[in-house]
Image (spheres, rainbow, N blue to C red):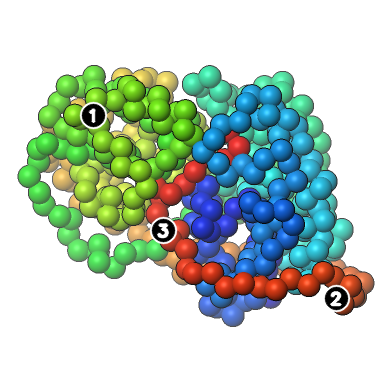
């Protein structure tokens, strides 16, 4: 079986957990004997081929106003124009067509469509290939993929989002199989009329288990207690909410923040933070960061589709305070491996932090139970089994009775692959915000 992976980015360009999981999938399935090839957007015009850790990776220059992997925030008008074109970016179809012609895959595993748009579905279908669509975000309902505006979660599509997603649900009928990285994200999108003909599955994202962390949790002096956040610095991730609530407590504790985001938002966070209590660490290795904190906080204000960082925190024997929204409650169970709070009750975050500050026994109990609670999500082979089975079933169920017309490979422009060094993609703190 030859699989074409389609995604907005690929390592070393990390937009979020999707890219981390995608790399593990591509390399893992290749180790199992599958042929794999990746197609992602890139910073340079045209189509470029690299061999990265043995995986052929095509990078296509984005046919839009700017490449959306950036810390700079374009103007509001530029962003609106970008999203307008991204509702159906026909210019990106030629890259999909060329890679399919070159590589002749059997099936396409489509991931984040930002930059590609649903035009990729049409090109894949035109080639007679089955599509497996993985839902990592809310892009099919919201151009910004977050359904978050003016500091609040959107309960319904606004008029602009509805207009920019007109016809998308009908187009999704060409998808043979849909996979949600959480039950929440699958039900949320299918509930809006998407994937009416597709078989449906939930496959939670996994992260490789660090065998060195399998023993009992570490012991340390309790104070000053160290709370930590790692990931993209953005409003929908709730970093400003975290800083505000932490500083109101007035406790003998520290807050460590790792990751980067849009420059204007980072500046706003630094301006509101007390440097004596709040540290901004920039990019950090995830496991190293986790070893330096006592409690991980995942204060998402938007409906986080999954939240891989919560799994990573539990794997490191940390109690996790997480928002009771989106897919996070599928990882964090209240008073089992952490505490849940609600963006709709802002002080609930401060209450949870204060509770773990005061009650050392509860903090240690939650930490001691954390890793065992996520063991299935540390089993990368289990996730590979699930994907391989779904891909095989999809291919068997949708294989065309007619073969596609032969391709004249001599007529295709010649691309010389280049080798690049292994990318450091295990670092959650290296994730950047995308178009917005």
Question: Whole-percent x and y of residue 189?
Answer: 65, 39
Which mark lies nearer to you, 3 or 2?
2
Q: Quadrant of the C terminus?
A: top right
**In whole angstroms, how far apart are the C-alphas of marks 3 and 1?**
28 Å
Name the residue tied to disc 1.
275
**In whole angstroms, how far apart are the C-alphas of marks 3 and 2?**
37 Å
Residue 325 appears in the picture as rendered: no
Please tell me whether mark 2 sits on a helix, a strand or a loop: helix
**In whole angstroms, how far apart are the C-alphas of marks 2 and 1?**
60 Å
Residues at discs 3 and 1 in contact (Cβ within 8 Å): no
Residues at discs 3 and 2 in contact (Cβ within 8 Å): no
Residue count near mark 1 (Cα–Cα under 10 Å), binned few <14, some 14–19, many ≥20:
few
Which of the two labelled residues, at mark 3 and mark 1, occupies the earlier sequence position? 1
Q: In the figure, residue 145 lies in which quadrant?
A: top right
The answer to whether residue 222 is left or right of residue 18 is left
Q: Quadrant of the N terminus?
A: bottom right
Name the residue tied to disc 3.
426
Name the residue: 73% across, 66% down: 107
Name the residue tied to disc 2.
409
| Res. 107 mark | none
Q: In the figure, residue 364 lies in which quadrant?
A: top left
Residue 292 appears in the picture as rendered: yes
Is 342 situated above or below 191? above
């Amino acid at each position: 079986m030859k699989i074409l992976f389609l995604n907005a980015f690929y390592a070393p360009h990390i937009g979020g957990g999707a890219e981390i999981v995608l790399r593990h999938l591509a390399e893992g399935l290749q180790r199992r004997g599958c042929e794999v090839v990746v197609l992602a957007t890139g910073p340079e015009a045209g189509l470029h081929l690299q061999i990265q850790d043995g995986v052929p990776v095509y990078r296509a220059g984005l046919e839009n106003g700017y490449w959306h992997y950036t810390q700079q925030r374009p103007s509001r008008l530029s962003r609106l124009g970008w999203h307008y074109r991204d509702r159906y970016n026909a210019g990106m179809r030629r890259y999909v067509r060329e890679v399919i012609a070159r590589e002749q895959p059997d099936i396409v595993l489509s991931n984040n469509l930002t930059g590609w748009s649903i035009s990729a579905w049409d090109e894949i279908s035109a080639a007679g290939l089955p599509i497996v669509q993985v839902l990592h975000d809310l892009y099919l309902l919201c151009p910004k993929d977050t359904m978050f505006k003016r500091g609040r979660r959107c309960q319904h599509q606004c008029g602009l989002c509805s207009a920019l997603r007109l016809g998308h649900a009908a187009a999704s009928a060409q998808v043979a199989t849909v996979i949600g990285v959480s039950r929440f994200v699958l039900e949320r999108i299918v509930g809006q009329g998407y994937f009416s003909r597709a078989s449906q599955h939930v496959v939670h994202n996994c992260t490789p288990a660090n065998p060195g962390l399998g023993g009992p949790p570490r012991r340390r002096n309790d104070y000053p207690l160290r709370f930590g956040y790692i990931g993209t610095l953005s409003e929908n991730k709730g970093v400003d909410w975290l800083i505000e609530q932490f500083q109101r407590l007035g406790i003998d504790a520290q807050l460590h923040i790792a990751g980067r985001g849009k420059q204007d938002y980072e500046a706003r966070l630094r301006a509101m933070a007390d440097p004596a209590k709040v540290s901004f660490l920039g990019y950090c290795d995830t496991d190293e960061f986790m070893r330096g904190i006592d409690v991980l906080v995942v204060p998402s204000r938007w409906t986080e589709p999954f939240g891989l960082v919560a799994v990573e925190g539990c794997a490191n024997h940390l109690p996790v305070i997480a928002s009771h929204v989106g897919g996070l409650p599928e990882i964090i169970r209240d008073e089992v491996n952490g505490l849940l709070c609600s963006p709709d009750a802002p002080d609930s975050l401060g209450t949870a932090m204060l509770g773990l500050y005061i009650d050392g026994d509860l903090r240690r109990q939650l930490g001691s139970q954390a890793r065992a609670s996520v063991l299935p999500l540390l089993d990368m082979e289990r996730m590979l089994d699930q994907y391989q089975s779904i891909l095989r079933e999809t291919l068997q169920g949708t294989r065309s009775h007619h073969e596609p017309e032969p391709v004249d490979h001599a007529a295709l422009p010649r691309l010389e692959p280049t080798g690049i060094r292994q990318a450091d993609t295990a670092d959650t703190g290296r994730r950047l915000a995308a178009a917005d």
